[in-house]
Image (cartoon, rainbow, N blue to C red):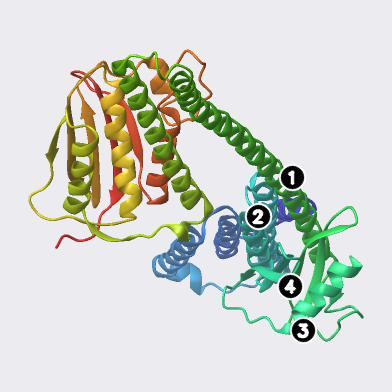
């Protein structure tokens, strides 16, 4: 603000001097009959004022016009120019002195404007950096903002050190990216983390380092260390110290804020994970307890009334026991699939598989398991090669077909279709039954705890496992009602090149 006041004051002084120059020119014309001085002073004053009020190219144009006017005056008034200049030497000297003073002040004003523009740009950049730190999300963004500010404000290389999950000091971010960091700088950063005080350049601790290491602190805790590179002989002034301190204060607040947000997010994720695990276990308990209850009841009836029971009833009880045991075996297979998928991605045995062969295995199992159901299959003419764990994908398809058979309301016609779109293989299982209720659509892939009045073999667990398997393969699965009739389930898998 002070610089602008000084520049405006100097502008006023130059304008006053230019005005005095014009008055002296008229005085020369009126008192000494010297029109040459009048023209000269007027032209010089006009040029001076134009240099303060116009852009560079306009100032150059004004100079050219002034020179042209002088030339025309010389050509058109040769007699006047030939007259001796004897009446106003003192006035001419005064005019020359005023002109020199005016030109000197113009140069000073232009220099002040140049440096003021640079300082204004620095202040804008500094404020932009502070605002960027206030709105930054994520530690990488905060680190990058700090180093960008050091680079743009001072033109210096810098690096930011932090501790990783194991507590080891690492170079979290550096600018430029190819900046070489020696082990001694990590040692200096370690000293700053331990002491909480700056070290390195200009300081006694770690004076061997060309970097000035500055801690980013929250209370007494060092969150990170900013290291700024200085060449030999370079000094740091108080203004730079204050600006760097301001950036560091805001950066420390941003890091602390982000750390707290990350911790809260971790707690929320863990809470949600525990909730889902509890719901999953409750749903599994219900799905396993119901068939076991049926098996135990049928066995008790057979044991207690073996001689009085009707052969047809006995046969029906044995069939029910077999079906419930078979379903339990299927449930165990699903749970084993969950452990494979959730344990580690490396547990997936993904190999290039021909889709037609996988579909053929599904059809063979369905014929044995559901002999009364007609399964219509449609695949592309050319073979498709897809990276998959074939055992799990077959199980997903069997789950979808089984759901279509059991919950479609007696539909005995099911379509299994495979198509391609944008480097993905699309698998679709469709039935023409009663479809899905709105309540079911909202929680298709969520393992929920059902009431005892609902089916003992529900959709929740199987579809939840299907979603886990498909996501582990990098695909997506959806379920909805068909526009015509029945339900339709679709999942995608990334597709390899065709054979």
Q: Secondary structure at mark 1?
A: helix
Closer to viewer: mark 1 or mark 4: 1
Position above or below: 443 against 171: above
**Do we see residue 88 in this rendering?**
no
Determine which residue is flagged by label 2. Answer: 139
Determine which residue is flagged by label 1. Answer: 260
Residue furthest to the left in view is: 381
Q: Residues within 10 Å of mark 2 (few under 14, many from 20)?
A: some
Q: Earlier in the sequence, mark 1 or mark 4?
A: 4
**Do we see residue 120 in this rendering?**
yes
Q: Are marks 1 and 4 in contact (CB under 8 Å)?
A: no
Q: Secondary structure at mark 4?
A: strand
Looking at the rendered structure, which numbered label has been put on residue 184?
3
Residue 354, percent across and down? 20, 57
Q: Quadrant of residue 26?
A: bottom right
Disc 2 from disc 3: Cα separation = 25 Å
Position above or below: 403 against 493: above
Residue 473, percent across and down? 37, 51
Disc 1 from disc 3: Cα separation = 31 Å
Disc 1 from disc 4: Cα separation = 27 Å
Q: Please give the name of the residue rendered at 79% of the width and 65% of the height, measured from the top-left corner.
A: 240
Q: Residues within 10 Å of mark 4 (few under 14, many from 20)?
A: many
Determine which residue is flagged by label 4. Answer: 228
* Foreground pick, 393 / 102: 393
Disc 1 from disc 2: Cα separation = 11 Å
* Foreground pick, 275 / 85: 275
* Foreground pick, 251 / 77: 251
């Amino acid at each position: 603000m002070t610089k602008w006041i000084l520049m405006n004051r100097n502008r006023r002084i130059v304008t006053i001097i230019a005005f005095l120059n014009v008055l002296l020119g008229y005085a020369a014309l009126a008192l000494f009959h010297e029109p040459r001085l009048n023209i000269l002073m007027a032209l010089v004053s006009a040029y001076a004022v134009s240099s303060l009020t116009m852009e560079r190219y306009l100032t150059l144009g004004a100079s050219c016009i002034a020179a042209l006017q002088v030339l025309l005056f010389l050509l058109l008034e040769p007699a006047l120019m030939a007259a001796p200049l004897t009446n106003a030497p003192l006035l001419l000297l005064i005019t020359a002195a005023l002109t020199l003073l005016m030109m000197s002040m113009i140069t000073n004003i232009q220099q002040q404007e140049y440096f003021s523009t640079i300082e204004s740009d620095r202040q804008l950049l500094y404020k932009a950096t502070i605002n960027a730190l206030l709105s930054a999300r994520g530690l990488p963004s905060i680190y990058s903002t700090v180093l960008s500010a050091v680079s743009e404000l001072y033109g210096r290389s810098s690096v930011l050190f932090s501790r990783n999950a194991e507590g080891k000091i690492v170079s979290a971010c550096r600018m430029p990216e190819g900046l070489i960091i020696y082990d001694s700088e990590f040692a200096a950063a370690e000293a700053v983390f331990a002491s909480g005080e700056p070290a390195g350049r200009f300081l006694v601790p770690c004076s061997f380092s060309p970097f000035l290491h500055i801690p980013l602190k929250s209370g007494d805790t060092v969150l990170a260390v900013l290291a700024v590179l200085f060449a030999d002989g370079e000094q740091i002034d108080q203004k730079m110290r204050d600006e760097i301190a301001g950036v560091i204060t805001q950066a420390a607040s941003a890091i602390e804020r982000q750390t707290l947000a990350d911790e809260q997010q971790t707690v929320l994720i863990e809470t949600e994970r525990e909730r889902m695990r509890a719901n999953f276990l409750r749903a599994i308990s219900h799905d396993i307890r119901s068939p076991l209850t049926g098996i135990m009841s049928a066995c008790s009836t057979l044991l207690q009334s073996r001689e009085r029971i009707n052969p047809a009833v006995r046969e029906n009880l044995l069939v029910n026991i077999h079906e419930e045991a078979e379903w339990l075996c299927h449930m165990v297979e699903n749970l084993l699939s969950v452990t494979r998928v959730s344990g580690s991605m490396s547990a997936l045995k993904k190999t290039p598989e021909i889709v037609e062969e996988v579909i053929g295995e599904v059809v063979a199992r369905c014929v044995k398991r559901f002999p009364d159901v007609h399964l219509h299959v449609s695949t592309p003419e050319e073979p498709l090669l897809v990276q998959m764990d074939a055992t799990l994908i077959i199980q997903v398809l069997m789950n979808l077909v089984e759901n279509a058979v059991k919950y479609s309301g007696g539909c005995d016609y099911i379509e299994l279709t495979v198509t391609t779109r944008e480097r993905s293989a699309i698998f679709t299982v469709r039935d023409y039954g009663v479809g899905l209720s709105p309540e079911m659509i909202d929680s298709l892939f969520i393992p929920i705890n059902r009431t005892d009045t609902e089916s003992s073999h529900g959709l929740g667990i199987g579809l939840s496992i299907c979603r886990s398997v498909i996501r582990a393969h990098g695909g997506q699965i959806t379920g909805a009602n068909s526009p015509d009739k029945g339900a339709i389930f679709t999942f995608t898998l990334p597709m390899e090149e065709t054979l």
